[in-house]
């Protein structure tokens, strides 16, 4: 199963949620933000190399150096220019065939680099900011997902401080929403590469992510 | 059902008995072709005479590959290697057009002069064959979801100017000849005057234009200036030579190669269509490289024969001293 984690604006926490969800599902996380890599990388082939035909997708998957398997993205402008997003489909399916579930960390925006992962994915999760003015961004992502046939499995209202308008989000977006509170441990997930679903499973944040993971698994069975 | 009709818009030209449409043909088809610098542009207008949406296939019958219209680098919806498949609305029209890298609609004619008169009539209609596929049921979903997403949303790549040493995939360059070639087709001579054969599927032409464009952009860049000072090859030339070397490398592997080698090269180049133009492209490379080499040799000799330093330094001295005296008088007036 290929799940895309999206959410129109930059900075809502797509990468964090991708790593958390990847840990909860024991999936391979693919950093598909071709223009601005979000997740840590290291020496070896990356997604830019894969999409430019220089490397096999399986060669680019890093195992055993963190809590999740990761296919990182490159960081150069030249790499981003040479990457052909139309080959992302084949790359994601190759990773799925070898490793199982795939969580795709999508870039912000509404261009093909944000759209193609949704077109390929079997389901998607929208990450939203809790303020009601951010609902419009979430709606745009929802519309894009609908246009590209990616079924919305759940909404993550991220970095919530007070009680966010969960029912409003659910009503407008048409999918169950979970709340991930503003938790400094979650803020560290990407930097330290320690997802709270493993390190602190009893926290509200971890339970929220697990709920989304369950929804993904249920969608898979259907 | 093959239905090729010659119902052109020429006034006063009587239809011959051969051209009468069979009664069952729902389409009135107008085909016209135009030859521009080694490429034939084909225009097909389909008029649906029945009040039902119909699906039609327009197949290319010219002796060359189809260069379809492109959106975001991908062939437009409905286009494939053979031609076009799509729907024509009830009692409506649809126009489609494409390019084919043959110099004229007939196989034997190798000149790209305009063909006039009656003979063009039969050649034009021979350029395509039309098949009626049946009623259109709205399931025209031939594009993959990925291709549809790319076309409707647009690619998001950094522009070429921000990327130094932009070496596109060779496959990219070759496949792009559809658009590039047509753009270049109107100018047979390259901007710098060197002669390049505009043979079908030659990427030499497209690249000369790209290099000219890169040259304009990077003319005053430190990179090119450094290249000039230290004797290294400028970026734009490197790009061209790398691409030519890739093509020549592929051609070398195919020269008397084994089936295994041939398959490897086929995969590298991205299919038989991309491979088809390789021999001509390499021939064009040879002539461009020789032309460029002789020009480079001449320029290098001219450069070696110059000795502008003495005159330049005395001019600079003169300029400096006149600046100084201007500044002195200006400072004087301020007090």
Image (cartoon, coloured by chain):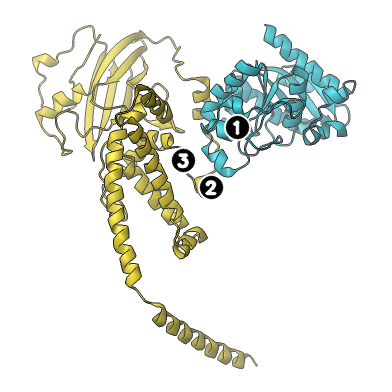
Chain colours: A cyan, B yellow
What residue did someone put label 3 on? B168
> In the rendered image, which quarter contains the N terminus of chain A?
top right
User: Spatial distance from mark 1 to mark 3, Cα to Cα?
Assistant: 17 Å
Residue under the image location 39 percent in, 50 percent down: B211
Name the element at disc 2. Answer: loop
Q: Which chain carries label 2?
A: B
- Compared to residue A71, the image places residue B161 above or below, namely below
Q: Do labels 1 and 2 share a chain?
A: no
Q: In which quarter of the image is residue B228?
A: bottom left
Residue under the image location 31 percent in, 54 percent down: B293
A169 displayed left or right of A120: right
Q: Could you tell me residue B245's position as x and y percent?
A: 38, 42
Disc 1 or disc 2, which is closer to the eye?
A: 1
B99 displayed left or right of A170: left
Tell which of B199 and A61 is nearer to you: A61
Residue under the image location 42 percent in, 34 percent down: B171
Q: Are marks 1 and 3 on the same chain?
A: no
Name the element at disc 3. Answer: loop
B77 displayed left or right of A128: left
> In the rendered image, which quarter contains the C terminus of chain A?
top right
Q: Could you tell me residue B100's position as x and y percent?
A: 28, 30
Q: Can residue B238 be seen in this view?
A: yes
- Residue neighbourhood size for the residue with mark 1, other residues' Cα within 10 Å, grouped as few (<14), some (14–19), many (≥20): many
Tell which of B218 and B271 is nearer to you: B271
Q: CB of mark 3 within 8 Å of CB of mark 2?
A: no
Q: CB of mark 1 within 8 Å of CB of mark 3?
A: no
- Compared to residue B36, the image places residue A181 above or below, namely above
User: Spatial distance from mark 1 to mark 2, Cα to Cα?
Assistant: 18 Å
Mark 3 / mark 2, whichever is N-terminal: 2
What residue did someone put label 2 on? B163
What residue did someone put label 1 on? A47
């Amino acid at each position: 199963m290929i799940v895309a984690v999206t959410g129109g604006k930059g900075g809502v926490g797509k990468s964090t949620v991708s790593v958390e969800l990847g840990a909860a599902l024991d999936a391979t996380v693919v950093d598909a933000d071709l223009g601005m890599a979000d997740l840590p990388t290291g020496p070896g082939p990356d997604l830019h190399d894969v999409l430019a035909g220089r490397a096999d997708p399986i060669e680019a998957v890093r195992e055993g150096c963190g809590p999740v398997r990761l296919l990182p993205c490159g960081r150069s402008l030249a790499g981003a220019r040479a990457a052909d997003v139309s080959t992302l489909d084949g790359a994601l399916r190759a990773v799925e065939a070898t490793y199982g579930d795939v969580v795709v960390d999508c870039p912000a925006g509404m261009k093909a680099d944000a759209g193609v992962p949704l077109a390929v994915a079997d389901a998607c999760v929208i990450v939203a900011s809790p303020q009601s003015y951010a609902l419009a961004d979430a709606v745009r992502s929802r519309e894009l997902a609908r246009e590209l046939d990616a079924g919305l499995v759940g909404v993550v209202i991220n970095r919530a401080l007070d009680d966010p308008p969960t029912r409003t989000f659910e009503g407008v977006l048409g999918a169950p929403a979970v709340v991930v509170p503003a938790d400094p441990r979650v803020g560290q997930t990407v930097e330290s590469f320690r997802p709270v679903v493993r390190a602190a499973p009893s926290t509200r944040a971890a339970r929220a992510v697990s709920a989304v993971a369950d929804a993904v698994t249920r969608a898979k069975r259907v | 059902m093959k239905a090729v009709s010659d119902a052109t818009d020429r006034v006063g030209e009587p239809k011959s008995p051969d051209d009468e449409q069979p009664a069952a043909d729902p389409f009135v088809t107008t085909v016209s072709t135009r030859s521009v610098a080694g490429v034939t542009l084909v225009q097909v207008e389909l008029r649906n005479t029945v009040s039902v949406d119909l699906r039609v296939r327009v197949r290319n019958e010219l002796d060359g590959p189809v260069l379809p219209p492109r959106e975001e680098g991908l062939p437009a919806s409905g286009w494939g290697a053979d031609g076009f498949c799509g729907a024509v609305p009830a009692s409506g029209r649809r126009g489609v057009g494409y390019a084919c890298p043959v110099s004229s609609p007939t196989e034997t004619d190798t000149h790209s002069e305009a063909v006039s008169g009656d003979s063009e009539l039969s050649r034009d209609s021979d350029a395509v064959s039309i098949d009626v596929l049946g009623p259109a049921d709205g399931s025209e979903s031939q594009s993959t979801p990925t291709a549809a997403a790319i076309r409707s949303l647009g690619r998001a790549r950094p522009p070429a100017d921000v990327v130094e040493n932009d070496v596109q995939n060779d496959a990219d360059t070759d496949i792009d000849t559809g658009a590039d070639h047509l753009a270049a087709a109107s100018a047979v001579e390259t901007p710098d005057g060197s002669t390049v054969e505009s043979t079908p599927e030659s990427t030499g032409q497209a690249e000369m234009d790209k290099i000219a464009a890169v040259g304009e952009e990077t003319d005053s860049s430190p990179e090119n200036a450094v290249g000039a000072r230290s004797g290294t090859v400028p970026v734009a030339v490197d790009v061209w030579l790398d691409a030519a070397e890739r093509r020549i490398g592929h051609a070398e592997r195919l020269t008397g190669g084994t089936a295994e080698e041939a398959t490897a090269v086929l995969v590298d180049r991205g299919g038989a269509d991309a491979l088809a133009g390789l021999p001509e492209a390499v021939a064009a490379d040879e002539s461009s490289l020789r032309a460029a080499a002789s020009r480079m040799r001449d320029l290098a000799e001219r450069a070696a024969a110059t000795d502008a330093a003495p005159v330049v330094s005395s001019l600079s001295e003169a300029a400096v001293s006149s600046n100084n005296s201007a500044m002195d008088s200006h400072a004087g007036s301020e007090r």
